[in-house]
């Protein structure tokens, strides 16, 4: 008599005459090769553990202040942005001439203090009138521009620029995508003309210090761009 009624068990091995022999053969095989099986399993467990730990370190490590390397004016990193990752590099305008800089940041890191990191990097370049979207909204209201919200669109920012003063938009992303893959993206745009002055795309597989591997190379490009722009060199 069958003990299972499901059609999925059309042949019940518990009633097969070969079942005892299969069990005995399997037991003998496992007993003979048990040390090898344990060793292989341990190696894979070690590899999986290391992968998980690396992902956790890269994905959850907190920001540190982005300081220049000792005795240098560069941010410490073993990497450079690939030439193909620099999509725009227009040095015809000194960014310090803009009265207002609107800073957007997006990050998966915790704590989410990317805005502080980028603001400090801009301040080191002499760009100090920097506002987050919430700060920019209050600034616009103080100048009588009511259409600007905490999530400002291009139209309202252009309205502010036309009535109050020129605005430079800095949009920085720093994300952990999983599997040791990091992504940094920087876009700096003149709101009045819509012209991109600097655009950098930097995906990077990192093992260790994600900030140095992904964020710092883009900061170095931004630094080069700002200094060349200030000298009027193209």
Image: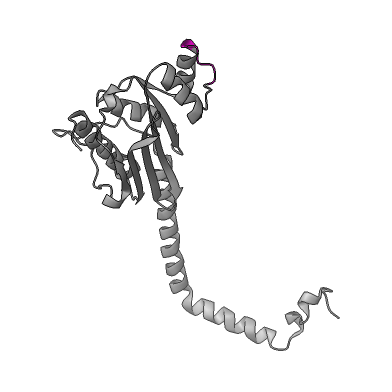
Task: Pick the quarter of the image with the C terminus.
Answer: top left
Percent position (x, y) of residue 211?
33, 40
Percent position (x, y) of residue 63?
36, 34
Report the front residue among 191 and 224. 191
Q: Residue at x 31, y 26 (%)?
A: 120
Q: Is residue 68 visible?
A: no
Give the left or right position of residue 22, taking residue 52 as reference: right
Colour style of the rendered protein structure: one colour
Q: How many marks?
A: 0
Q: Is residue 86 visible?
A: yes
**Which picture quadrant has residue 229?**
top left
Percent position (x, y) of residue 88?
31, 43
**Residue 118 versus residue 33 in the image, above or below:** above
Report the front residue among 18 and 117. 117
Give the left or right position of residue 89, taking residue 27 as reference: left
Give the left or right position of residue 118, taking residue 40 as reference: left
Looking at the image, the residue that sits furthest to the bottom is 17
Report the front residue among 82 and 44. 82
Magenta stretch, main secondary structure, is: loop
Percent position (x, y) of residue 227?
20, 32
Residue bounds of the magenta highlight: 142-147
Q: Residue at x 39, y 39 (%)?
A: 61
Report the front residue among 194 and 222. 194
**Residue 100 versus residue 33 in the image, above or below:** above
**Which picture quadrant has residue 21?**
bottom right
């Amino acid at each position: 008599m069958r003990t299972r009624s499901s059609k999925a068990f059309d042949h019940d091995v518990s009633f097969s005459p070969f079942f005892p022999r299969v069990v005995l053969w399997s037991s003998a095989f496992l007993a003979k090769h048990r040390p090898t099986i344990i060793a292989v399993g341990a190696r894979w467990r070690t590899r999986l553990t290391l992968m998980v730990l690396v992902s956790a370190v890269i994905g959850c490590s907190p920001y540190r202040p982005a300081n220049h390397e000792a005795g240098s004016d560069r941010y410490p990193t073993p990497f450079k942005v690939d030439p193909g990752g620099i999509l725009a590099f227009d040095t015809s305008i000194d960014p310090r001439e803009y009265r207002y800089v609107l800073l957007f940041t997006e990050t998966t890191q915790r704590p989410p203090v990317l805005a502080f990191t980028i603001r400090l990097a801009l301040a080191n370049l002499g760009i100090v009138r920097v506002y987050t979207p919430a700060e920019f909204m209050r600034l616009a209201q103080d100048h009588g521009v009511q259409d600007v919200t905490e999530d400002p669109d291009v139209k309202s920012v252009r309205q502010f620029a036309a009535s109050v003063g020129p605005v430079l938009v800095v949009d920085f992303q720093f994300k952990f995508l999983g599997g040791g893959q990091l992504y940094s993206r920087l876009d700096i745009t003149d709101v009045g003309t819509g012209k991109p002055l600097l655009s950098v795309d930097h995906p990077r597989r990192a093992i260790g210090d994600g900030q140095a591997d992904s964020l710092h190379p883009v900061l170095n490009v931004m630094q080069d761009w700002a200094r060349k722009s200030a000298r009027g060199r193209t």
